[in-house]
Image (cartoon, helix red, strand yellow):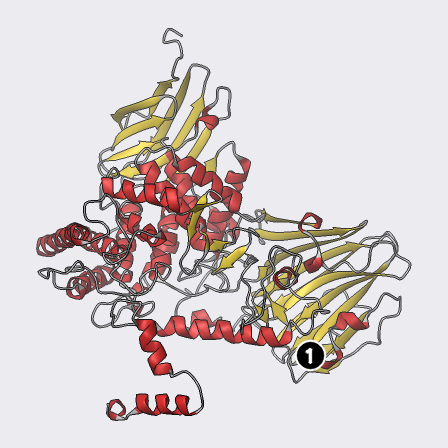
Amino acid sequence: MWLKWLPWRFVVSRLARSRGFVDPIHLLSVVHRFSQPSEVTEPVELVRAGMIFHARGLINSRAIQHNLDWVWPHWVERQFDPMDKAFVPRAFSLTHVNLTHRNWTAVGLPDWDWLPIVDPRGLVTPLLDGWSLDVWLLPDEDDASGGPLLPSKLKAEQVRQRLELEPGESGLWMHTRAEQAGAWVDEAVSVVTDGGVPQCRLKAEGLLPGGGWLAVSVRPANPEGISFIHEMDYDAGTARLRVNEQDNVRFEQTPERMCMSHYHEGDVLLHLGDSQAPPAEAAHMECRVGLATAAALYRLEPGQARSVEVRVPLRESENVEPEASRRGTLVPGKRASWDEAMAGVCELRIPERWMQFLYDAAVRNLVLHAPGEVYPGPYTYRRFWFRDAAYILEALGCVGMFGRVKRAIDLFPSHQTGRGYFRSQDGEWDSNGAAIWAIHRWSQLSGEPVPDELAKAAVRGAEWIENKRTNPTGKKPHAGLLPAGFSAEHLGPNDFYYWDDFWSVAGLQSAAAIERARGKPAWVERFEQSAASLLKSIDQSLARSKTASGRDVIPASPYRRMDAGAIGSIAGSYPLRVWPADDARLMGTMNFLLDRCMVRGGFFQDMIHSGINPYLTLQMAQVLLRNDDPRYWPLVQAVADLASPTGQWPEAVHPGTGGGCMGDGQHIWAAAEWVLMMRALFVREEDDRLVLGSGLPEAWLEAGGEPLRFGPAQTVWGPVTVTVTPGEQAVEVTWEGAWRDAAPTVDVVLTGCGRTRVAGDAGKVTMQRAGASQGV
C-alpha cells in the first residue's frame, strides 16, 4: 500500500519530459477521456497479448524487409509485394504484422491439446507459435519448369487446398497441391499417434519434368511472423533434426543431403542454386540472431514422382502432458477416436454441397477445439473466454455432444472469484451472464439436472450481477445498467454497453430456472425480479438516451450514436430471446445495420476488427429468421462465400483480399455460428413451441429434389429428427421426436407453402405448394 504514496506519476512524467518524450501519464489521461470512467481501463490480459503481438511485429520489421530475397510465409509475400492488392506501406509502421491473410487450418485429434496449423500455401507450423516446415521443388539447370517451385510465392490459381474429413485415426487431413509449368508438389498434413505420442505427420510428393530436388525446409517463421531458431543438430544415423535443443523433426526417408545456413549467410535457399550438386551436408548450425534455416534434400529423377514423410512429435513421451493438462484445463483420461467422437452427432443433409461441407467441417472443428475447456481458435485465440465459450458450447450441445459441454462447464467454478465473478479476464461484465446461461442451456438440452456445485456457482454468479449493477434509482441514462467496461472488445471504448445488460438478464433468468428445477422458490422469485428490474432499466435507459429516445433503435450504449457497435445490442433477440422477435427496436436496429454497415453482403465492423465478420453476419441472419424476415438468406449465402477453401473463417475478412485481417485465422466461434445457423433452418425453439423448416430456402424445396434432413437435433423438449421431402404438388415434413415429457406445439413453416400449427406428436404434415391443385 505504501507504493500509492510514492510520487511515481510525477517521477515518470518528469523523466519523460526531460528526455524529450511525450509525457505518458498525460497521454494516457487524454486517451481515457474517449471512454466512460470504468474500474478496468484495459484488462491486463489484453495488454499482455497486445505487447507480445507487437513485439513480434517489431522483430518482423527488423528481419523481413531487409531480407526480401528469403522465402517468407504467404502473408509476407503478398503484403510486401507493391503490385499486390494486399500491399501495406511500411513507412511509419513500427511493427509489421499480418493484416491481410490471417488464414490457417488446424489438424489434430479429439481430446488432444496439440493443434498444428497449415497456412494457405501449405506452410506447416506443428507447435504452438513455433517454427514451420515448407516443401519446395528445386529444378536442375536444364529443367524448363520455370525455376524453383516455392508455394508461398505462387498465385492463387496455382495452389489448391482442401480439408478431408475421413473416418479412422487421422480424421482430418489438410491437402495442398502447388503446380508450376508441369512441376507439382502435393502435401498432406494430419496428426497421428505412435506409442501414445501424438505426431504431426507431413506427407509430401513431388515431380519435376527435368529432374531436381524436393526440399523439406525448416523455417524460422509462421503465419504471425518470426519464430526463432537458434540451433539445429542433425543426426544422419537416425535421420533426426533437433531444433533449439527441444523439438525433433524425424525424416522417415533419409535425405540425400542436409543443408543449413545462419542469418548472416542468408536463407538456405540462396545456397542451393539450381545445380545437381547442392552444398555439402551440415550437421550443426548455430545462429545468434535466431534465423537459422535448413533444407533436407531428396533427389527427383526427371518425370518421376517421389514421396517422403516427415514427423514432428508433439510431445516427447506418453508420460508428458501438455501445459493445458497441467493447468487443469485439459481433462485427462481416455481420448476418443474420431469415429467415437462423431458417433450419434446430429447430421445434416442438404442439396447445397458447399454448405454441407461447411457444416461437417465446423462440427469437426468444434470437437477439435474442445479438449477440456473450449478454445475459439487454434493459435491467436488458443485460450478461454466465457463469451466465446457460450456460443461454442451451445453449438456442441445442439448437435448432441453433451459430454464435451459438461466437462467444459465443470471447469467454470475454477474461474470464479470469491465474490462470484466468472473471470476469464478483468472487465468482462458479460461473462457472468454467459457462464450461467451456458450452464442452464446444457441442462435444458441434455435433460440433466444441474449438479450442486454448478448450481451454487450460478447462484453466486447471479448475486454478483445484482451487486454489480449501477443504482437503478438514478436519473442518468445508465442507471441500473452494468458498469462501463470494454465488453465484447470490438464495440469501442469502455462504455455502458447494452450487450452486457442483455447477457446479464439472460443469466438472471437462467439462474431462476436452475433454482426452479432444484425446488428453491425463494431464489426463483429473487432472480426473476432482478431480471425484470434490469429489463426495466434497459427500457428506461433507451427512453433517456438522446440517440434512441423516440426512435426504434438500440445503440451500443446510451451514450453512443448509432454505429456499427449496435451489433452487440441484437443479443436481446439472438441468442438470448429476452425480447420478442418482432420488437420494433430490434428491427429498427437491424434495418440500420443492413443499410449502413454491410460490405460484400456481410456485416462490416468498423471498430477494431475493421473487416467483414462472418459470425456477426450470421447473428444478424438469426435475428431476421426469428422474425420471419426473408433478408436472412442473402446473409447466410454471403458467409458461405467468405469461407476459405478448407471451410474456415477468420474472425474478420479483409474486404479487398478476402483473407483474414483480425483475430485467429480459424475462428471457432464462427464455426459454431454456422452449425447453429444450419440448425435454425430446420429447427428453432420459440418459447412454448418448436418451429420446423422456416429457414429452408425455396430452391431447396424444388419438386423432385432429394429429401432434406437434420437430426437428431437437441431441443429443450428432447431430440428431434426432421425430414423434408419435396414433391410436385406438396412438400412433406416428417419428424421423429424423443420427447422427455409432453410433446411441444409444432409450427411448420415452409417458403412457398405457408404455415401450419399441429401437435408435436403428429409426426407428419403435408404442405401444399402455392398455386398447386388441391384436387391432386
Q: Quadrant of residue 586?
A: top left
**100 above or below 360?**
below
Looking at numbered disc 1 in the image, what kind of residue is underneath it? Met
Q: Residue at x 66, y 61 (%)?
A: 81
Q: Is residue 505 left or right of residue 650?
A: left
To which residue does mark 1 refer?
232
Q: Does residue 15 sit above or below 605 in this rendering?
A: below
Residue 719 appearing in the image = no
Q: Where is the N terminus found, in terms of image quarters?
A: bottom left
Q: Residue at x 52, y 51 (%)?
A: 655
**Residue at image point 62% right, 70% down:** 221
Towards the viewer: 614 or 212: 614
Q: Position of residue 321 (x, y in %)?
A: 49, 71
Which quadrant of the rendered structure holds the C terminus?
top left
74 sits left or right of 331 in the view: right
SS category of the residue bearing label 1: strand
At which x and y percent is residue 346?
Answer: 42, 41
Q: Estimate the x, y position of residue 542 in percent, counting from the top left.
A: 19, 51
- Above/below status of 188 relative to 330: above
